[in-house]
Image (cartoon, helix red, strand yellow):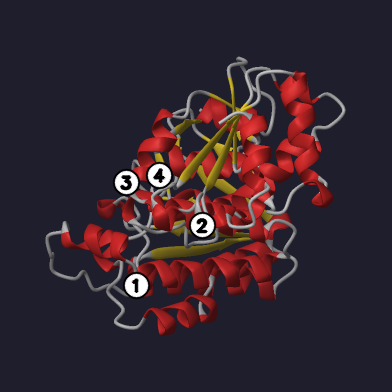
Amino acid sequence: MNVRELLDALGDPKAAETYSAVLGEPLLLIDVPDAASAAGLAMIVDPSRSVTDLRALPCVIVLVVPDPGVFAGAGHVPLMLGDVLLTEAPDAPRPYVTGTADTLRSTALANPIAATTLALLLRSSEGLDATSGLIAESATYSALQGGDEFTRWRATRLPRPATVGTANERVRVERDGDVLRVTMTRAARRNALDAAMRDALAEAFALAAADPGVTLELRGDGPDFCAGGDLDEFGSRPDPAIAHLTRLTRSPARLLQSVARRTTAYLHGACLGAGIELPAFAGKVVAAPDTSIGLPEVALGLVPGAGGTVSLPRRIGRQRTAWLALSDQRLTAHDALRWGLVDELVD
């Protein structure tokens, strides 16, 4: 869609009934090839120019901007309007990503409700404090747990015997002077985050929060820092509403955020889902060259649920966070450093 067509569409007060994931339109691509188109898009920010607010549309809004320079002097416009900003420019400046919309389209068509819900959550959470953002994320996550897309994904999973473990079997906590070292120790399962590990991390982060004199180090045993949540536990709680309150009752993300300035996370190997959502809260993130980062939750019919819609936007912006979640791509350590998701690379 070009900008002129978009302006015409937004003149219809029922535009949200046309561009909606519920009605088969989960992705809206808007081409912005030149300065004239950029100027037209800027008109949308003026509420007197259109009947429908573009940001109210229940679909993923992607701006395709071959040259970000067309927004010279009006850089706030794409930041306000686009969920993802794509460009052809190499080494795209923040908040743009170099690439095409192909993978975004595939994800949006496969799981339109989760994809759109992610975009809406990131839009509406922008500017919220961390606590409010975590509450919004958890409520959204629970809502999607009751949806068809997550139910469909769960049906593809073969049941496996539940692994029972204690906090001591999931996390090792060591005190060395003023350093509190917290290490995930479930290496055989790639440090997959289950309820026992969640509780153990919450306890460890609470120790750090209670002692303002300590610095916190977060690490993971084995070849991977953390490959995300334990898929065998996803959706195993019978009541999503209670699961929502449980996440807020024992929230490693909230506790880690409270000690962020004195926390360093050391990443290596796979850092997926919770494996990047939690460490992104840290004041300093150090990564090994083999670090691979991704947000796979939308493919499961969900949104990030370990704090990622709060922690990642604060480091890389909501547009790049949305791209990472919707593209099914992995970010290398070097790209993560360039984006600001990682602060330092070490061998």
Q: Given contact means CB atoms under 8 Å apart, are the residues at marks 4 and 2 in contact? A: no
Residue count near mark 1 (Cα–Cα under 10 Å), binned few <14, some 14–19, many ≥20:
some
At mark 2, the secondary structure is: helix
Q: Given contact means CB atoms under 8 Å apart, are the residues at marks 1 and 3 in contact? A: no
Residue 300 quadrant: bottom left
Distance of mark 3 from mark 4, alpha carbons? 6 Å
At mark 1, the secondary structure is: loop
At mark 4, the secondary structure is: helix
Indicate the position of residue 245 as horizontal and vertical percent values.
49, 82
Above or below: residue 173 compared with residue 250 = above
Frontmost of labels 4 and 1 is: 4
For residue 110, the mark is 3
Residue count near mark 2 (Cα–Cα under 10 Å), binned few <14, some 14–19, many ≥20:
some
Residue located beneath label 2 in the image: 17
Viewport quadrant of the N terminus? top right
- Residue at 13 percent of width and 65 percent of height: 159
Residue located beneath label 1 in the image: 146
**Residue 34 can be seen in this image:** yes
Which of the two labelled residues, at mark 4 and mark 1, occupies the earlier sequence position?
Answer: 4
Identify which amino acid the numbered label 2 is placed on. Answer: Glu
Residue count near mark 3 (Cα–Cα under 10 Å), binned few <14, some 14–19, many ≥20:
some
Which of the two labelled residues, at mark 2 and mark 3, occupies the earlier sequence position?
Answer: 2
At mark 3, the secondary structure is: helix
Q: Given contact means CB atoms under 8 Å apart, are the residues at marks 1 and 2 in contact? A: no
Which of the two labelled residues, at mark 1 and mark 2, occupies the earlier sequence position?
Answer: 2
Above or below: residue 106 compared with residue 90 = below
User: In terms of depth relative to the viewer, which is nearer, 219 or 127?
Assistant: 127
Which of the two labelled residues, at mark 1 and mark 3, occupies the earlier sequence position?
Answer: 3
